[in-house]
Image (cartoon, rainbow, N blue to C red):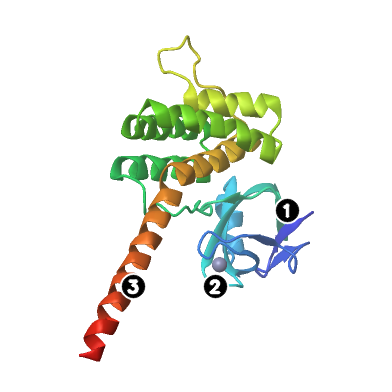
Amino acid sequence: MAVIIDSSGRLHHDQDHGLALMCPHCGVLAHITPVSVPDFNQVQLYKPSHVGIVYRCEACNGPIFLKFPVKLYAGSRIELSPSFVELERPRERFNLTHLPEMTESLFKEAMACFSIGCYVAFAAMSRRTAQSVFADLGENIKLSLYDQLDDVRKMAEIEDQTFSAVKQVIFGNDSDPQPNLPTLDAYDAGVLLEVMKDLLYQAYVRRGRLQQAMMVRRYFAQESDSKVTPLEKARC
Ligand SMILES: [Zn+2]
């Protein structure tokens, strides 16, 4: 696939109509079109090793910044390598409403690390998040979350190697012999993220939603009780 800036400053992309990626603003897998291409003469003059191009997300019109390595400077064209870098990556989302403040802030940071592909930092922040959950909920809940993790492995059919890395991140101790945090690749990190979301859902979100729903039911039941006149009083 060739990406070329011609001498009139136009960008030629093999996949001009097909270039799509996950937009960091709207989170949609959307087509993108170039709107700001660097000036041909300036780039030819300074010959940088990388150039930046701004695209428009066709779903939300937001700007998407991509950085391309320059492959070749020729007389009438500049050839770019198609392996671009996204300067802004989509952020992971999770409903943090029912989480305690400390767990919420740790998991937010864990998701930020995941979004930019820093998987060692992501594993470390995931362990910190899990430690804050166990400290908050106690040893019994820790044991029941440990059992639930095994159910998750069976339901989601997670491979043994990935599962053991995920388990070590969540339930391992900082005092275990080094390295007590396993090294995760992109797939392991993705699995860890989903397992962490499920763990937090089980520990807080599910209970919080149920308690909220029951409170609303109780409120409406009391409201309707107070509006009904008892039969004996109605006869008087
Ligand atoms: Zn968008």
Mark 3 Cα-neighbour bin, 10 Å: few <14, some 14–19, many ≥20: few
What mark, if any, has residue 220 been given in the picture? Answer: 3
Residue beneath label 2, please? 60
Question: Residue 65 occupies which quadrant of the picture?
Answer: bottom right
Q: Is residue 47 visible?
A: no
Which residue does the image show at 68% across and 24% down from the upper left? 161
Q: Residue at x 32, y 78 (%)?
A: 224
Determine the quadrant in which ligand 1 lies: bottom right
x 65%, y 28%: residue: 162
Task: State the CA–CA distance, disc 2 to disc 3.
Answer: 40 Å
Question: What amino acid type is highlighted by mark number 3?
Answer: Phe
Q: Residue, x 35% and y 29% (percent of image)? A: 138
Q: Is residue 40 above or below residue 196?
A: below
Q: Amino acid type of disc 2?
A: Cys
What is the secondary structure assignment of the residue under circle 3? helix
Query: Which residue matches tag 1?
Result: 74
